[in-house]
Image (spheres, rainbow, N blue to C red):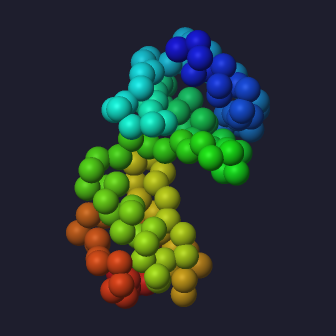
Amino acid sequence: HDEVDKFFNAHLTVRDDKNQIISVTPADIDTAHHLGGEEPRPIIVRFLRRTMKMSVLRARRQLKDKGIFLSDDLTKMNYKLLQQLKHNKNIAQSWSWDCKIHAVTKNASNAKIYRLHDALPPDEEIPVNS
């Protein structure tokens, strides 16, 4: 746990719901371990409190240009849905937040939450108002 909280504190400015800077401590982390055999090996972290998890995820944009990614641990089906939306020519952007998949179409300004039954092949039109 020490390495994980050191990483978060060295690379992220984590803020709470009141916009106060907070530190991630080993006491905030339930478990942390490497996954699979692929390189680089992803690390999964389980926080003791959901509020800390959400604070860390809010700060993830700070890592955008460093080649480091923080994301929810999605089910296989939600991961597939997110990948479909990311590769869809009609989607301007897509992301996961609190294990829900969000996307904005190129002809809309508001994000929509997509569910598994909304999944479409990458080249099909995605309805804006469904």
Percent position of residue 107, x then y: 54, 87
* Count of marks overlaid on the render: 0
Q: Please determine whether, in this image, residue 48 is positioned above or below residue 100.
A: above
Report whether residue 53 is seen.
yes
In the picture, residue 11 is in which quadrant?
Answer: top right
What's the residue at 49%, 36% (across, down)?
A: 40
x, y percentage for residue 108?
A: 54, 83
Residue lying furthest left in this view? 117
Give the residue at x 39% y 63%: 83
Q: Which quadrant is home to the C terminus?
A: bottom left
Residue lying at 45% horizontally and 37% vertically, measured from the top left? 39
Q: In this view of the protein, can residue 114 be seen by the observer?
A: no
- Residue 59 percent location from the top left of the image: 66, 42
In the picture, measured across the screen, residue 106 lies left or right of residue 120, that is right
Q: Is residue 11 left or right of residue 24?
A: right
Vertical order, 126 against 24 (above or below):
below
From the viewer's perspective, tell me whether residue 67 is left or right of residue 32.
Answer: right
Residue 53's spot in the image, x, y percent?
A: 52, 33
At a point 34% along the width and 32% down the height, the residue shown is 36
Is 74 in front, or is 17?
Answer: 74
